[in-house]
Image (tube, rainbow, N blue to C red):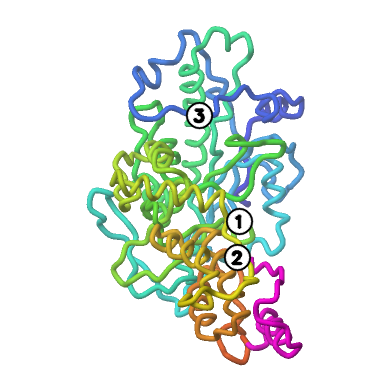
Amino acid sequence: MKRGFLNSSKAKQQNEQSTSLPVTKAKLVSKLSHGVVPNAGKGQIPKGYESGFGTRKFFELNATSLDYDPDLYVCTAVPLVTMDAKLSDVPGGWAECVLSGHVKRMIHTTPGFPRRPLSPANGKKLYRIGEAGSKGLGMFATRLIRAGEIIIDERPMMVATASTNSIVSPDDMAKLSVEQIRQIGLREWGKFMKVVFDRMPPENQKAFMELANSHTQDGSDDITGRIRTNGVVTGFRDRNSSGAQGRYTAICKDISRINHSCRPNASWSWHTDSFSLRVCAVRDIRAGEEVTVAYCDALAPASERAEALVPYGIYDCNCGPSCSDPAGIRIGDKRRDRFRFEPVVVFAPHVPPKVGEAPDAWVKPALRRFRELEAEGLEGCNEYHRTAYQLINVYCFLQDVEKVKKYASKIKGVHRVIEKKEFPASFSSAEGIERSQYYQMSEMRKKAGIPEYEPILISFA
């Protein structure tokens, strides 16, 4: 027998009538409380409230079926495993999940599913989990990890809904405060996720409960608190959903140990075909250096980053001057604003350089942007990749082979992470560079006798 879906006959009937849990009908509170909530938990539950969950009798349905109401939430193992399966028997393991019928169908029809998560080239782990000071545990490189290398590709222990999807009738809404609605949602969510937790193999249950929990005083229970603290948003969502609602979050054993930095040296991405979360280096990571990712938008202003980190129990971010030093924050915020809203695009000049000015002086805006991105530790963002690519094209046009090689070496690893493919090898050799589009364009101008600074509109972006 396969480990498949759990739901009640009553709940299934309600979903078939479009009255139970469909996102379009849910009255949702998009933002859950965190920190200290007075009388959190039962103290906020109104007198006489009756749970619609506690009396459900669960039974197992056909795990191989894809024929479910798109808005019906069911529990299942992904990928499918037998009831007596052990982690040692399943390469890459499996995740116990709560999914809508729509998402379950989407996962199982993804081309290539279920591929195995990727392994290191030599089969040896590139990291260890160890003490990280006030941050608790962290992940550390055991050797030099080059930009673009996969550090870990891990299938989660659990995949949960990222929001409570709490339904409250319009009549009840008038009687309840926002916090009461939130607490009811947390309570019902906790009961649902307890069913998922109980399905997990003992080793994963133990590892899950050893994870950090920064939601001990806001009404979250031991399970939902850890989901909120350690979950990473996946790449799929319920149909007809938007914003925070309808998303899913994955909780991994080792990836959950990776701590935050506003200048991260790694980034993560979700891969449905292998049902795994993949972490790659975005710049070189020295042996012994901590592996970090951004829990928030690293391009946001410092104040917004600080606010986004509070639910994770991070109250004093000390990633660098752009987080902790007033002058550094002002500089960092101005830079990030330009990174987001003022992309640099350089054009070939139509006048000769001034006396004493370098032939590539017109490239300075892109060079300055590139240096600022490196100074802020933002090699993993799209603007870094775009700017580096622009510099490669510029120096191909200027026929400066060594500078093309310089920026090609800087972008090669990041390109693999962002574009999910190898950077063109042609930019690593003089022969390849000389065959490039912009190099050849410059060569043709020379052969045609066009003056070096003849007006020409060329974008290198």
Above or below, 419 relative to 403: above
Q: Are marks 1 and 3 in contact (CB under 8 Å)?
A: no
Question: Could you tell me which quadrant the C terminus lies in?
Answer: bottom right
Q: Are marks 3 and 2 in contact (CB under 8 Å)?
A: no
The stretch in magenta equals 434-461
Going by the numbered disc 1, the residue's amino acid type is: Pro
Residue placed at 39% from the left, 43% from the top? 302
Q: Residues within 10 Å of mark 3 (few under 14, many from 20)?
A: few
Q: Residues within 10 Å of mark 2 (few under 14, many from 20)?
A: some
Q: Is residue 37 magenta?
A: no
| 120 vs 358, nearest the viewer | 358
Residue placed at 29% from the left, 46% from the top? 324
Taking the image as drawn, is residue 422 in sight?
A: no
Q: Position of residue 248 (x, y in %)?
A: 57, 43
Q: Position of residue 428 (x, y in %)?
A: 55, 85
**Label 3: which residue?**
31
Going by the numbered disc 3, the residue's amino acid type is: Lys
**Label 1: which residue?**
79
Going by the numbered disc 2, the residue's amino acid type is: Val
Give the side of residue 75 with respect to residue 255, left or right.
Answer: right
**Sequence-wise, which precedes: disc 3 or disc 2?**
3
**Label 2: which residue?**
346
Q: Position of residue 89 (x, y in %)?
A: 51, 64
**Sequence-wise, which precedes: disc 1 or disc 3?**
3
Above or below, 36 relative to 371: above
Q: Is residue 445 magenta?
A: yes
Callout count: 3
